[in-house]
Image: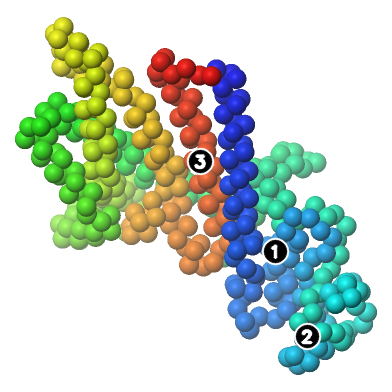
Amino acid sequence: MLEFILRRSCYSLLIILGVLILTFLLFNVGAGDPAAAMLGKNASAAEIDALRRRLGCDLPLFYGHYCLSGAFQETPAGSGVFRRQYGSEPVWAETPDGLREVRGNEFRGPSGTTFYRCQRNGFNSQFFRALGELVSFRKTFPYVTFFDFGDSLVTHEPVREILWRGMKVSLLLMLPVFFGEMLFGIAFALLAAAFRNRWPDRLILLLSVAGMSVSYVVVIILGQWFLGYRFGLFPLWGFESPANLLLPVTVGIISGIGANVRFYRTVFVDELGKEYLRTAAAKGVSPFKLYGVHLLRNAALQIMTRAGSTLPFIFTGSLLLESFFGIPGLGYAGIEALYNSDIALLKALVVLSALLFVVINLLCDLAYAWADPRVRVK
């Protein structure tokens, strides 16, 4: 078992490294210059360069001693004459003959010349800074810090505090949804399997398919209209009290129960066709023990697989539920970060979601060996 845990942990670390590289390429290479996009075309060179340094997007991608600088700006356009806009630090210009230091406040060279500043540590790059956001070492207590994604570009709060605050709210919302979907799904699936090919089974399947066919947004709007607005049973917006969670939890369970019933019914019907259950039924085992003990115990792996695929969404929240009901969880924070181009918060949410998927899949693999002794851990 210990060997299996170590091997799976090593595989998970490699997967996390791959996710980090893909996330780095997505935000640092594919997204272009975030500073220029955020500040707009009317921003000065000093403002753009200051935001680049704050975001670290002026650094080399992986390794290098030259960082992008906006100290000089071409004026007038296309003349090949550059004037220093701010500061007095040493700057190098990239010309056809290579890099050469710029002296004075004016530079004449090819139109579109790129300017750089020099740094001693070549490993001070965007990639290693991205690794440092996950884990970094310090000379003072606490010596090691995790998940330090800096500050939000909009609210200027530490991203770590936003994640922690939003995760607590998302857990309060999504935990009841998760357990409600799973318990009701298993209960109705057992009922359908017990009466398979009869009218209760057909009715449950009909309602499940109908529930799966209706869009999540439609269920939310109908729930808000009838239960919240028309009959006034639930509050519609905000997170002032636990009563604000009753309607979104109800909507979340109704929206997800159909898919769970279909999945669990298929698993249970497949198990009922196996010899050990037919033998137990022939020996006169009570239906409660047959379905509640033997069937559920041997279907535990499939139940864990289904639960493991949805567990990460418990922590990251539901984008639609939190957006439509104004619940300040991680899903709502992600939508706001997307609208406001808050790159730091968006990157933190993407990395957090990926890490949750990898860790929960690892825990599910370990739970398989614990729940079913037939699983041989090699």
Q: Which mark is residue 99?
A: none
Q: Earlier in the sequence, mark 1 or mark 3?
A: 1
Q: Which mark is residue 57?
A: 1
Question: Hey, which quadrant is residue 173 in on the image?
Answer: top left
User: Residue shown at 36%/35% (left/top)?
Assistant: 306
Q: Which mark is residue 111?
A: 2
Secondary structure state at the residue bearing disc 2: loop
Between tags 2 and 1, which lies in front? 2
Q: Amino acid at mark 3?
A: Leu
Q: Earlier in the sequence, mark 2 or mark 1?
A: 1
Q: Amino acid at mark 2?
A: Ser
In percent of width and height, residue 84 lies at 83, 82
Q: Quick check: can you spot residue 13?
A: yes
Left of 103 or right of it: where is 48? left
Between tags 2 and 3, which lies in front? 2
* Rendered position, 335 above or below 258: below
In percent of width and height, residue 60 lies at 76, 61
Q: Which residue is mark 3?
A: 356
Residue in front for this viewpoint, 131 or 1: 1
The Cα atoms of the two marked residues, 2 and 3, are separated by: 48 Å
Left of 332 or right of it: where is 131? right
Secondary structure state at the residue bearing disc 1: loop
Question: Hey, which quadrant is residue 196 in on the image?
Answer: top left
Q: Amino acid at mark 1?
A: Cys
